[in-house]
Amino acid sequence: MVATSRHRTEPIAASHDAAVLHREAVWFARYLVDAVPSDALIERYVRADARVLQDAPTARDEAVLAFVHRHPWSVGLLDAGTAFMRGAPLLRKKLVVMMAVLEATPDHIAVTAPVEDAGMARLVWRLGRAGAKAAVKLVVGSALCALVVRR
Amino acid sequence: MSTDSVVDAIIVGSGPSAVNAAYPLVEAGLTVRMLDVGNRDSKYAGLIPDGQFSELRRTDPDQHRYFLGDELEGIGFGHTGAGAQLTPPRQYVCKDTERLQPIASESFFPLQSLAEGGLGGAWGAGSPPFSAADLAGFPIALEDLQPHYEVVADRIGVSGTRDDLMPFLGPTFALQPPVEVDSNGEGILRRYATQRGVLNKAGMFLGHPRIAMLSREHRGRLANRYWDMDFWSDAGKSVYRPKWTLDELKTFASFSIVSRRLVRSFEERDDGEVVVTAANVDGSGTELHRARSLVLAAGTLGSTRIVLRSMGHVDRRVPIVCNPHSYAALLNLNTLGQGVRDERHSMAQFCLVHAPDGHTRPFTVGHFYSYRSLLLFRLIRDTPLPVRESLTIMRHLSPSLGALILQHRDTPSPTKYCSLGAGEDAPLEIEYSLSASEQRRIDDVEAEITRGLRRLRCIKLKTMRPGHAASVHYAGTLPMSATDVELTTSRDGRLHRTKRVYVADGSVFPSLPSKGLTFTMMANADRIGCHVRSTLRA
C-alpha cells in the first residue's frame, strides 16, 4: 500500500501530503457522518490540517495513524481507544478538524445540527444507545490501541 | 491633521473609556484629537449575510469563511485563556498586540487591543453598575457615578428591568425594556420562580441581566432581531460597540481622530501644554501632538505602559487586579428534550447573584449563556468520548446546555503586580497569583452556587478555570487615591504629580467587585470627561 511504503521513509502523521490527507478526509467523513464529502470539503480539510495541526506528532500518534492508514475500518475504534489519552492525540485532533469542516457547510446539516425537539423518550433512547456504543468501542478500542502502540 | 495645532484635549485610545471620556468634551465644543492605532476588521464584516444563525447554517455555502475563518483560525486546540472565546470575525481586536504591546509573564496572559473600539469590539455587553458595596475602598461614592450611569446607559442603550436583582444592580432609570430570554434561560427562570423562597434564603437571586443591547430602536441603531448571530456580526448595531459612539463623535467639527498612531509617552511643559509622542505604526518615525490636557484611555495595560515610560519608572512595581474567572458547563434538565425557539440573542440570558450576607456586603455575580450560537465541534473537542458518539450526544444535549460565567472579586496584594523594564520596546512584566485564602474563598462560593444550581435542576458537568487574565478585566495599576501619592490618580482621574494628565480607563479602579467593569468604566470616563471639561472652561 502506498501509505505503508510512505511510512518507511516519511512519517504519515507528519505528512501534509495532499493525497494522504484526501484519503483521510474521506475515511473520517464516512466515520463521522456516513457520507463521502465533496471535493470542496476535502480540500478544506487538507488546508485545515496543514494550518491547524502543526505540532510534531509523538511516536504514539505515528503508530496510531499509520495503522488507520493501513486499516481505515479502525478509525472509530482507535478514536475511542485514544479518547481518554492525555495530550489530545493527533487522530482525535484530525477528527475534530474534520468535524468542524463538516459542520460549517449546509451539505451535512441534517446530521450535524442540534436536535431540538426529540422528546424525552426518544432523547433517552438515543443517548442510551450512543452511550452503549461508546462504551463498547472504548473497551475494544483501548485494547486495539494498546496493541497498535506496542507494535 | 497638522500636529502643530494645540487642541484642548488629546484622548489616547478609542475603546469604551476613550469614546465616553471624549463625548462630554466634544459635545461642549472643545477641540479633541483622538490618537489610536485603530485596527479594523477588513475581512469578515461584509461576508456575513443577514439572517438567523440556524438558517445560515442550513443555507449559506460560504459559512465556513466566518464560522471557521479564512485561515481556519476558528479551529484551535489547547488554548483556553484570554481570547479563546473570540470568533474569527472578532479576532481583529487583538491584532498586532504581541508585536506592539509585548507582555512578559509566566502566570498572566492578557488580551489587549489596538483595534478601533478597543476590546469593546468583542465584549459580552454585560452592563451591571457597581453598587455602594462594590465601591467600598474607592474614593468616590455611588452618588458620584449615578448621573453618569444614566448618561452612559442612554448613550449606549442598556436593557434590563427592576426585578430581584435590583438591590445588587441598582435602579438605573435610563433602561430599555429587557431583551427576551431564550427557551433555555426561561426554563431555569420558571424553576427559580417556584424555588424563590428557599434560594433567596440561601442568598441566591436570579433575574434579567443588564446588557448593552437594544430591545428598542435607539440613536439610529436597531432593536435586536434575535438572529443569534451576536458572536459573529454586528447586525443592526443592536449590541453596543464603542465604534458606534466614535461614529457619532466624528460628526462633530471639533473632533478629529489620527489613526495608526501608538502613543509612547507624554511630557508636561511649563507653558501649560502636554506634549504627546506617538509612533506611526506603519512607518518608523514619531511625531509630537500638543494639547491643553491629556486623557489616557488606552486600556489598563496600555495606559500603565505610557505612564511608567513617561515618568521614568523603570522596574517600578505597580499593583494589578483582575477578576478570577470560571465557567461552569451546565445541563439544564428543565428543558431537556423539549422544543426551543429559534429566535434568540446570543448574550447572557440571565444574571445570578450569590449574596449570603445581603446586598450591603460583597457578593458574587454570574451570567448564564446558552450554548446555541456556536458549532458543536468545540464541545466535542473537550468530551472524552469517541467523536462520532460525542456528536450524537451533543446534538441532543446542546439545546439544554449552557455556561455560567462567574467573575470573582479581586483586590490588590503583593503577589499581583506589573512593571516596565528599560528600553523603548521593553515588555510589561506581570506577576499574578492568588493567595491560598483567596482561592479557598472562590472554591467555597462556587460550591454554594453549585448547590443552588442543583435546586434549579441544573447539573454542573465541568468547571473550567481558564487561567489568570482570562476575564479580560484588568484594573488597579494607577488607582484613585484620596492622598497625593505617586503613580496614583485623584478622585477626578488626574494622575498625581501632574497638572493636566488624566487617566479614564480601568487603571484607576483600586479593586474589582464581582462584576464586569466596562459599564462603570464608561460612566467613570464620562465623569472624568465632565471634570476635564470644567477645568478647560475655567
Image: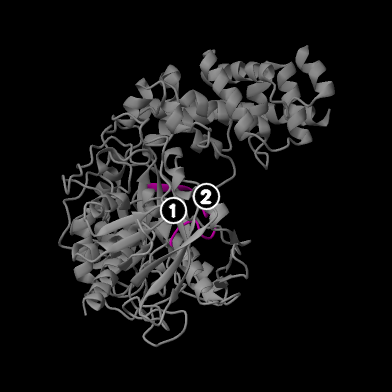
Please, what secondary structure does the residue beneath circle 1 have? loop
Q: Which residue is mark 1?
A: B37
Residue B170 found in image quarter: bottom left
Q: Position of residue B287 (x, y in %)?
A: 46, 61
Residue B96 - label: 2
Earlier residue among tags 2 and 1: 1
**Between marks 2 and 1 in the image, the one whose residue lies nearer the viewer:** 1
Question: Mark 2 and mark 1: span between their CA atoms?
Answer: 10 Å
Indicate the chain on which mark 1 is placed: B
Q: Position of residue B316 (x, y in %)?
A: 57, 77
At x 56%, y 18%, the residue is A42
Kind of residue at badge 1? Val
Residue B52 found in image quarter: top left
State yes or no: residue B484 in magenta.
Answer: no
Q: Which residues are magenta?
A: B458-473
For mark 1, does the 10 Å Cα neighbourhood hold few (<14), some (14 to 19), or many (20 or more) residues? many
Q: Is residue A131 above or below residue B2?
A: above
